[in-house]
Amino acid sequence: MGTVSATPAALDLIDEIVADHGPVMFHQSGGCCDGSSPMCYAQGDFLIGDYDVKMGEIGGAPFYISGSQYEAWKHTDIVIDVVPGRGGMFSLDNGREKRFLVRSEMCEIPVPAKKASAEAV
């Protein structure tokens, strides 16, 4: 199954945001606009839905993904990175002239072993 991790630059930005806002959490949705970027919120400012999936933690911050997005990405290793730009409108990386970005790599999907073919007579 997929995992989530963060680059050193992302961990530095998380530390910077935590210093300003206290503990944070991330949510990745499959929505449009800002929903295509990982969103960083102060813990308690975003309500986790019944179908959201916790993929892990980065920099001590829980990372959730919407259930429908998880189904599409469940065989993906997600790496949170930082690039120049503005974060999502409600994300705590906004206004810092750098933003979080998802990079990904497909995991190897296990293929069931084929049944041994019957020996020819």
Image (spheres, helix red, strand yellow):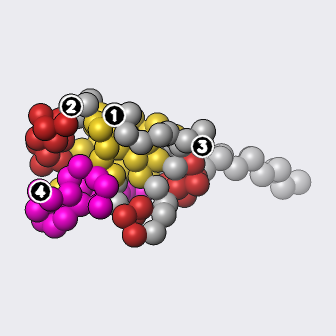
User: Magenta includes 52?
Assistant: no
In what element is the residue under mark 3?
loop
- The x, y position of residue 19, in whole percent, is 12, 34
Q: Name the residue under label 4.
A: 96
- The x, y position of residue 28, in whole percent, is 41, 52
Residue at x 38%, y 34% (from the top left corner): 44
Q: What residue type is labelled 2?
A: Gly
Is the residue 57 above or below the residue 88 in the image? above
Circle 4 residues within 10 Å: few <14, some 14–19, many ≥20:
few
The Cα–Cα distance between marks 3 and 4, rounded to whole angstroms, is 31 Å
> Does residue 15 appear in the picture of this structure?
no
Query: Is the Cβ of the residue at disc 3 closer than 8 Å to that at disc 1?
Result: no
In what element is the residue under mark 4?
loop
The Cα–Cα distance between marks 3 and 1, rounded to whole angstroms, is 18 Å
Q: Mark 2 points at which residue?
A: 22
- The x, y position of residue 24, in whole percent, is 28, 36
Give the side of residue 51 with respect to residue 83, left or right: right
Magenta stretch? 83-107
Circle 1 residues within 10 Å: few <14, some 14–19, many ≥20:
some
The Cα–Cα distance between marks 2 and 1, rounded to whole angstroms, is 8 Å
Q: What residue type is labelled 1?
A: Gln
Q: Name the front one of labels 3 and 4.
A: 4
Q: Name the residue under label 3.
A: 51
Query: Is the Cβ of the residue at disc 4 closer than 8 Å to that at disc 2?
Result: no
